[in-house]
Image (tube, rainbow, N blue to C red):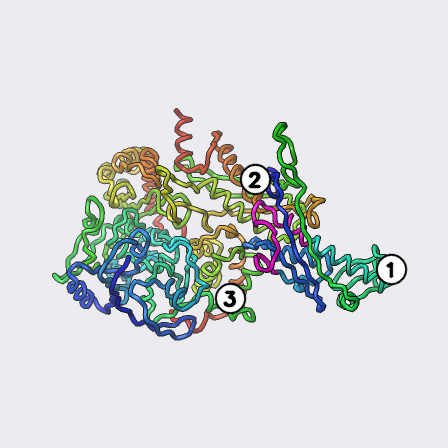
């Protein structure tokens, strides 16, 4: 099968790579680029565990052809915060509020929240629920997740959205 | 609701190895698998509490068949109670070693000492104390290792075949949950407005983690009550996917959910703790369904209580 | 879905050329949220022609009294558009109800129409507005009513291996006399296939005493979104009292006649819901007209 050349930004780093035409973005991230923070939950766009941001908007990478990210900015959980020294306010808030249990939904959940806070600096509880309605969680019942997002929204109110995002 | 903690009438022991290093770090080896419920944290808290260590000084190595002892599975709401006791027993053994050395160094009786903030104090004269590090060093200089193992198995019996009697569990968790619902009697849709949960967990070693369990269990129970249905067609699951096996999303949670922790200390539990994993989930489904029954004056005996079942029940009533 | 080639043309002409080259063995894709899922896992196509880079097809405009939506507008574009919120708020509401944020950001209104799922929210709301759609192929452009683009036994008359949907256009409403509504019933509040979906449009006469025109669309009760024609005919030139709406809802139950469904419920239950929904949606549209309800505020 003919490979397609792809050039895009992954967490601000330029990537040049060849992929089969029917590769989904999730496969590219996990299998070829070894960015395993993004999870495969259902493979069908139903659970949100595979959520990444493309030019600042949340998408289900399991049903998103890799070739569609050409010339675009992709943000995965690995691109948020600087590991343990400088976690993103969302990551900090999730930890402080106990919003992480098994952790499987967490990367997708945080990215959906990040997309929300880029667009809406003062989200209401309804706005938050809308933003994460596409991210299923079985462990937490969403309550501490919503609390964490509220906390992070207050912490990030004065910040600009990540400068590198092309929106 | 009351719910037995641990395997039913069968042994299910747990073991732990604990090593206190000369820099004051405690290494806890436990087979207990933390699947997100927070057992690594809780076991570290138990050890740090018993030895007066800073929580950050307890490192937990868990669920590694190459390095950790058997602690049984993370199921049956058992780990805080059983692996907690195993860790506590290991910590108690080390405490006894340190106690003996410290009492000799401070020239007091063994029973007169308390362990707090990385020091060992004389109870009636707190100005008389010695640092934990000094005591560990003194032990090592005498060739004594501050290392121990601990294990625990709940006190149960199997069932008596003749009488049906026995002691299936060493302890029980108790809970009451309350649900307020609104039913649209034209469409059958149910909205859960309020969920209040009160759980006797013996002792909440970590309040946030107990709340997390109850909250997660409540929403799972809400799903079981209202929307989760495994559909079988000739023995084959017709909805093996999230599209048609529906679980609650963030939009389905009640606007008010309140978790209340009750602490009726369990004598045989670590610092009085019992368990909460399964108890978190069980009362919610009947609470929600009972609330629907209370609203409509109709009883439902299977779940989920879908909008269609409600409409059918209402129509049957009118007939 | 597996495919050997993936094209990303930058113009409609380029896209049509590629489709013709493949003589029916390639197909158009935009967001792909209906295509790259397990339902189509065993489908093999020679090539995908991804038109999402064709910028001229992603727009929402109002000129004089004509509102036009480019086929590549995503559900998020429509949900967030001030033009749509101000002109036909129920369309914004419908677009907000599609799937999840992740799906709405990628899925397009064009895909919603061409994939012809009976209960596609955005398409359903559009049908109440009776829009005209423009399609292009190597034979040139053609226009048709959106309602005529559905095959009776399911699917779309638009051939995604040869044709591209360009835009959807409808007349703006005079909110003194006209308005619409959208409603949805599901097994949970979000991200679920609807048990029942409905959209409605109504126009009252000048003194608001009678109904001049009404369109009621209901799904899923057949393989395509269903216009409840008998119910509409009953209502036209009549009043809008509660008794009339009750009678209309009874007629609607026979008009719709949904089947037994493993996931959505029994025929009798769904029929009952049709009646409830029609009664409620007629009241809501009427209320919207009488109160001249405008921008979508998240709940209306």
Instruction: For the residues labelled 1 and 2, say whether their Cβ atoms are less than 8 Å apart.
Output: no
**Residue that label 3 marks:** A157
Instruction: Give the camera-side residue of C213 and C290.
Output: C213
Chain of the residue under label 3? A
Regarding residue A120, the answer to whether it shows in the image is no
Say which quadrant the N terminus of chain B sits in: top right
Outermost right residue: B107
At horizontal 23% and vertical 68% (from top left) the residue drawn is C9
Q: Tell me the quarter of the picture where residue B9 sits.
A: top right
Outermost left residue: C139
**Residue that label 2 marks:** B178
Chain of the residue under label 1? B
State how far apart marks 3 and 1 are (Cα): 58 Å
Q: Which mark is residue B108?
A: 1
Span colored in magenta: B61-87
Q: From the viewer's perspective, is the residue at label 1 or at label 2 nearer? A: 1
């Amino acid at each position: 099968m003919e490979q397609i050349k792809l050039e895009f930004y992954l967490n601000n780093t330029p990537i040049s790579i060849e992929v089969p035409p029917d590769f989904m973005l999730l496969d590219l991230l996990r299998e070829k680029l070894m960015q395993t923070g993004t999870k495969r939950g259902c493979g069908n766009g139903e659970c949100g565990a595979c959520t990444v941001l493309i030019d600042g908007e949340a998408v289900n990478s399991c049903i998103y052809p890799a070739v569609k990210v050409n010339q675009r900015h992709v943000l995965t959980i690995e691109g948020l915060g600087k590991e343990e020294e400088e976690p993103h306010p969302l990551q900090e808030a999730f930890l402080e509020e106990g919003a992480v249990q098994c952790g499987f939904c967490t990367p997708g959940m945080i990215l959906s929240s990040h997309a929300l806070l880029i667009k809406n600096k003062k989200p209401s509880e309804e706005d938050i629920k809308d933003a994460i309605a596409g991210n299923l969680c079985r462990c937490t019942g969403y309550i501490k997740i919503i609390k964490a997002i509220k906390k992070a929204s207050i912490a990030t109110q004065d910040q600009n959205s990540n400068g590198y995002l092309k929106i | 609701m009351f719910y037995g903690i641990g395997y039913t009438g069968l042994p299910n022991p747990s073991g732990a190895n604990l090593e206190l290093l000369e820099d004051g770090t405690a290494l806890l080896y436990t087979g207990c698998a933390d699947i997100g419920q927070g057992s690594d944290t809780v076991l570290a808290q138990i050890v740090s509490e018993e030895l007066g260590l800073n929580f950050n000084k307890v490192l937990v190595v868990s669920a590694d068949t190459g390095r950790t002892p058997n602690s049984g599975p993370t199921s049956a709401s058992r780990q805080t109670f059983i692996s907690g006791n195993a860790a506590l027993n290991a910590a108690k053994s080390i405490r006894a070693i340190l106690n003996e050395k410290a009492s000799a160094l401070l020239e007091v009786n063994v029973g007169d000492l308390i362990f707090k903030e990385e020091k060992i104090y004389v109870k009636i004269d707190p100005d008389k104390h010695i640092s934990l590090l000094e005591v560990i060093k003194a032990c090592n200089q005498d060739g004594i290792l501050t290392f121990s193992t601990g294990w625990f198995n709940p006190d149960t019996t199997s069932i008596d075949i003749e009488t049906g009697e026995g002691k299936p569990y060493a302890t029980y968790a108790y809970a009451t949950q309350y649900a307020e619902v609104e039913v649209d009697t034209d469409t059958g849709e149910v909205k859960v407005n309020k969920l209040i949960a009160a759980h006797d967990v013996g002792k909440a070693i970590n309040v946030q983690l107990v709340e997390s369990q109850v909250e997660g269990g409540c929403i799972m129970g809400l799903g079981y009550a209202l929307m989760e249905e495994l559909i079988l067609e000739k023995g084959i699951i017709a909805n093996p996917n999230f599209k048609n096996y529906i679980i609650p999303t963030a939009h389905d949670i009640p606007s008010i959910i309140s978790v209340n922790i009750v602490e009726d200390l369990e004598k045989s539990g670590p610092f009085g703790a019992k368990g909460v994993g399964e108890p978190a989930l069980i009362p919610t489904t009947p609470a929600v369904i009972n609330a629907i029954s209370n609203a409509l004056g109709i009883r439902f005996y299977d779940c989920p209580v879908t909008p269609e079942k409600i409409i059918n029940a209402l129509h049957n009533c009118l007939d | 879905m597996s495919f050997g080639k993936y094209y990303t043309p930058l113009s409609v002409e380029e896209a049509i050329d590629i489709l013709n080259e493949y003589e029916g063995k390639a197909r158009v894709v935009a967001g792909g949220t209906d295509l790259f899922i397990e339902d189509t896992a065993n489908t093999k196509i020679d090539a995908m022609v991804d038109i999402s880079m064709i910028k001229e097809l992603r727009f929402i405009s109002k000129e004089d009294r004509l509102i036009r939506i480019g086929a590549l507008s995503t559900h998020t574009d429509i949900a967030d558009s001030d033009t749509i919120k101000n002109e036909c708020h129920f369309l914004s509401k419908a677009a907000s109800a599609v799937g999840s944020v992740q799906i709405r950001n990628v899925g397009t209104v064009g895909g919603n129409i061409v994939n012809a799922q009976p209960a596609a929210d955005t398409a359903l709301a559009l049908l109440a507005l009776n829009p005209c759609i423009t399609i292009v192929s190597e034979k040139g452009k053609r226009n048709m009513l959106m309602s005529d683009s559905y095959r009776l036994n399911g699917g779309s008359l638009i051939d995604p291996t040869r044709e591209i949907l360009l835009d959807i256009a409808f007349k703006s409403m005079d909110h003194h006399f006209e308005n619409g509504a959208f409603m949805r019933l599901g097994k949970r509040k979000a991200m679920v296939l609807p048990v029942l979906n409905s959209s409605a449009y109504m126009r009252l006469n000048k003194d608001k005493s009678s109904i001049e025109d009404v369109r009621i669309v209901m799904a899923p009760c057949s393989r395509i979104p269903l216009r409840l024609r008998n119910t509409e005919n009953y209502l036209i030139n009549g009043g809008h009292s509660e008794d009339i709406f009750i009678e209309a809802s009874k007629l609607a139950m026979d008009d719709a006649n949904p089947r037994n469904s493993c996931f959505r419920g029994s025929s009798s239950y769904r029929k009952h819901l049709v009646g409830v929904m029609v009664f409620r949606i007629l009241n809501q549209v009427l209320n919207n007209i009488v109160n001249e309800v405008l921008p979508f505020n998240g709940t209306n």
